[in-house]
Amino acid sequence: MAKAQYAILRFSKYKGPEIGRIEAHDERTKEKYASNPDVDTNRSALNFHLIQPEHSYREEAERQIAEAECRVRSDSVKLVEVLIAGTPSFFKDKTQDAIKEYFEHALEFLKQKQRAETFVSAVVHLDEKTPHMHVTFVPLTEDNRLSAKEIIGNKAKLSQWQSDYWTHMVSKYPDLERGESADKTDRKHIPPRVFKEMTHLAKQSRKIEAVMND
């Protein structure tokens, strides 16, 4: 029986100083990535943009916010990052053109949900084990309010985001399945290093279980 292949969509919200660190990771401006050993800098030249940033992430966020003349609180979210990915087996044996087409289709969905002019960057990483895309945008509403809460919403709205995304993706890739949303799994944000360690332990556990079953 073939393993399930999932369409993955995850949100992260950033308020200030951490925006620079996110940019350094997404745009591969660091020389080493100690917190993420899966990054193979020898393959970083394979990464590509679907939206090329014209300025630094923080500079572009501040520019858009200033032009919108919206109210900004000290705890306002100034940048939203969307992680678009898929099950590793989904990308197996796919050409770079096919991978690009997948992420272009995903980006079309995001542009249906959020004003195109608010996007800062969309970059696809091929220098890690599984292809994925980081998309960043300034959470400005249609009436120029800075409100990540309104755009991304509560758990119910996040679940709707997941359902709408799956519907969009499965129209082109019918083998994809909808992943479980955070409101059902009660999953919290997990740092990449911890997530990778958990993944490794889970694989080891499955190997041990298989030996015991044999």
Image (cartoon, rainbow, N blue to C red):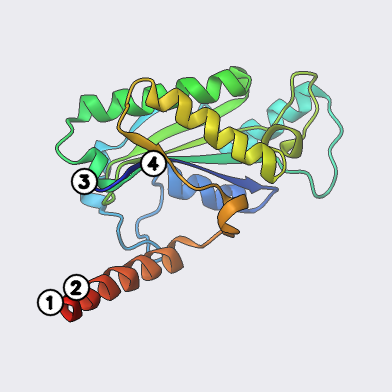
Dot placed on the residue nearer the N-terminal end, 2 or 3: 3
Disc number placed over residue 85 in the picture, else none = 4
Distance (Cα) linking label 1 and label 2: 6 Å
Depth check: give the residue in front, 16 or 211.
211
Amino acid of disc 3: Ala
Depth check: give the residue in front, 206 or 77.
206
| Residue 187 placement: quadrant | bottom right
Dot placed on the residue nearer the N-terminal end, 4 or 2: 4
Please say whether residue 58 is visible from this viewpoint: no
Which residue occupies the extreme bottom position in the image?
Answer: 212
Distance (Cα) linking label 1 and label 3: 21 Å
Q: What residue sits right under mark 3 in the picture?
A: 2
| Vertical arrangement, residue 67 with respect to residue 58, above or below | above
Quadrant for the C terminus in the image: bottom left
Q: Secondary structure at mark 4?
A: strand
Q: Residue at x 53, y 33 (%)?
A: 163
Amino acid of disc 1: Asp
Distance (Cα) linking label 4 and label 2: 28 Å
Classify 10 Å Cα crowding around label 3: few (below 14), some (14-19), many (20 and above): few
Task: Where is residue 63? Give x, y as percent.
Answer: 69, 28
Q: Residue at x 80, y 27 (%)?
A: 145
Dot placed on the residue nearer the N-terminal end, 1 or 3: 3
Q: What residue sits right under mark 2 in the picture?
A: 210
Amino acid of disc 4: Ala
Q: What residue sits right under mark 1 in the picture?
A: 214
Dot placed on the residue nearer the N-terminal end, 4 or 3: 3
Please say whether residue 38 is visible from this viewpoint: yes
